Image (tube, helix red, strand yellow):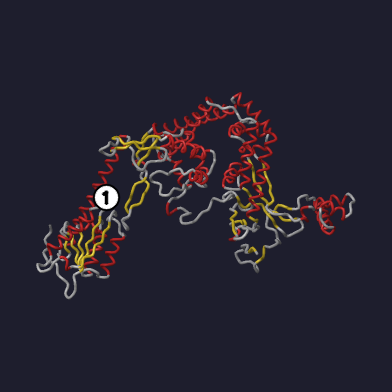
Amino acid sequence: MMRLRQPIQMAFGRPTKALIQARYSTEEQRQTSTEDQIANCRRFLADNLPRDVELDQLVIEVIREPEVSGELLNRPGINEVWEGIESKRWDLIVSEESSRLYRHMTFAHQLFNTAVDAGIRILCPTDYIDTTDEDWPERLSSSQSQHSRANYYNRSRIKRAHQGLWERGAALGPLKVGYRRRPSKPATASAPAEGPYFDEVDEETAAVVREVFDRVAGGEPPWAVAEWLTSIKFSKGSHGQKPEWYARNVIELIHRLDYRGEQTFRKKISKQQLTTGRSKLVRNSADAVLTRQVPHLRIVSDHVWYEANAAIDRRRSRLAVPSGADHPLTGKARDSRGLLATIFVCGICGGPMHGEGRNEGGYRCARAKNYECWNRTTCVRAQVQEAVLNAVVRAVMSLADCREQLVARVLEMHASGGDLAASQRALQSEESKLSGSIANLCLAIEKGGDGMESLVERLVTRERDLKVVRSRLAELASRTQDRKPPPTADDVLRHLESLQAGLVAGDRRAGVILRQLLGGPIRAIPHQQFGSNKVVLRAEFDLVLAQSLPAVVAESIASDPDTALSEPLLVRQQILVDLFTPSALPLHAVEAHELAETGLSLVKVGAAIGMSKRQAHLCSQLGAKMAAAGVKDPFVRLTERPEKVSRWNRVRGRRATDKDHRRAS
């Protein structure tokens, strides 16, 4: 035990105040460690007090810091020590060793320097540090260097142990969903189970994982799959902090290589932040990442894995996106769960139609607010959703009348094998091209020269594409062996009715179905009422009705080269929907004019249409003007900003920048 060169000095006229600080890190996990440290510090104080002073004459305060790393700058316990030093709350601070205060040379020196300047003595018996000695800075630097080196060697030993476990095929990291962990030495009546541990497939949870991949590969968005997993109360595993599933959890599950029999380790490593002492995960270099094949842990086929990941990638607007603080959306809230979110755009500038308004709510072009788009027309949110869904339902149910012809065509293709044979021929051709390209790239790399990095990058891309193509060929081969008969006409009708029920419900399931059927975004096109300054919106979008049929029928139609000629509406059908309620005048103008042209009186024209004589007269006049102008639709599509627009008020004049400074009323 350290003996002090200068004995502890007692305060004059008041009790001497001392602090005992004790800490142990998360690695040690010994609950009795702090109590042992406190007892050791008490013995040290008792041995070094003046002969006529007892330990109970000191006012001793204790600060405990269990399970926290000494490399952190800010900790609840050490922050209290800082506050006590700044307020000169103690005369003496005792800690078993300097690493209990800080295991960081810079932070430790800052704390000791501040305490010495405040007239507070710090004692660390194990490190032989006493701030009343002149050589205490050298002793502190030496002890901190030893503690840092001990941490370094400890991390190296842990890394070496992990390397050995990885080479033996043992489990590393948290247990992933779909697997269970088996100890190499099972528990007995007298001893618990011992490692190393090995993972194996848990068929009960693996079945759910397979369904997740099938749903995502089929086009269902991650948030919808997350809601389904939450509804069935599927566990995230031991590392899940919240029981609810989110889209991010589903995407991470889809990206895991374990499910196709491959594992990686150390893709990210922990890096200490020098300013705070905290650690953060950063991407490891590619050559330092460990990879191993684990075919016994495969849960899904290569084809399903690649299809699900491709479905996730298709949802990305950009493939190369900066990460972390460089990401453009860092710190910005984003709500992509609305029925028409991300698919309802302005027909003039292509910008998103944003929802706004507190009462009934509406949509407006997001760029119009900053005068970047002249389309300032709005539409009621509920009315838009109802109009779009009703139009889609009508188009989908129109297939019920021709379902027998569709089934007959599928049966014909099924018998000849044409639906799979065409896909197989296309994939074989693509495989041959990729193999030739890989051979050429390998030859170029062997010859060497400039642009080697570009050649290697292209080779990696081609090899990845070849893997995907071969996985699809393997999937086609398995489907050829296990082909099921196509659905009957009644099966098609039940499938269409199921889609109709989902669309009419208007919930998030409706959004999934809608995105599956759309051939592009829903465009809000401004139209001006004939003979008026009123501008309204219509929705224009394309439907791929073949996607509303059962999967077997849809795939057969997609692979049929004659479908575009015989059934063009199945390939792409354009829909135009009013996003407003038209008034009686433009709605009945053409009909009133046609009735008046037959010689009927205005009274009879009004009675036939269901309006008064005055309204019939106005409708007839508008219809006559439309006929003279050769217009049948009372709402004319706009491609340029009209001169006069109802409810688009002008600001006085225009600024020198020639920008459009019109505001919505």
The N terminus lies in which quarter of the figure?
bottom left
- Determine which quarter of the picture holds residue 117: bottom left
Q: Amino acid at mark 1?
A: Gln
- Determine which quarter of the picture holds residue 543: top right
Pinpoint residue 410: horizontal percent, then vertical percent. 63, 29
For label 1, the crowd category at 10 Å Cα-Cα, with few meaning under 14, some 14 to 19 and many 20 or more, is few
Q: Is residue 178 left or right of residue 370?
A: left
Placement of 183 over or under 321, stated as above or below: above
The C terminus lies in which quarter of the figure?
bottom right
Placement of 440 over or under 531, stated as above or below: above
Give the farthest residue toward the top.
416
Placement of 306 over or under 629, stated as above or below: above
The residue located at (61%, 38%) in the rendering is 547
Give the farthest residue toward the bottom.
13
Q: Is residue 165 left or right of residue 663?
A: left
Q: Is residue 375 left or right of residue 445?
A: right
The residue located at (85%, 58%) in the rendering is 613
Q: Secondary structure at mark 1?
A: loop
**Residue picked out by circle 1:** 29
Pinpoint residue 463: horizontal percent, then vertical percent. 44, 34
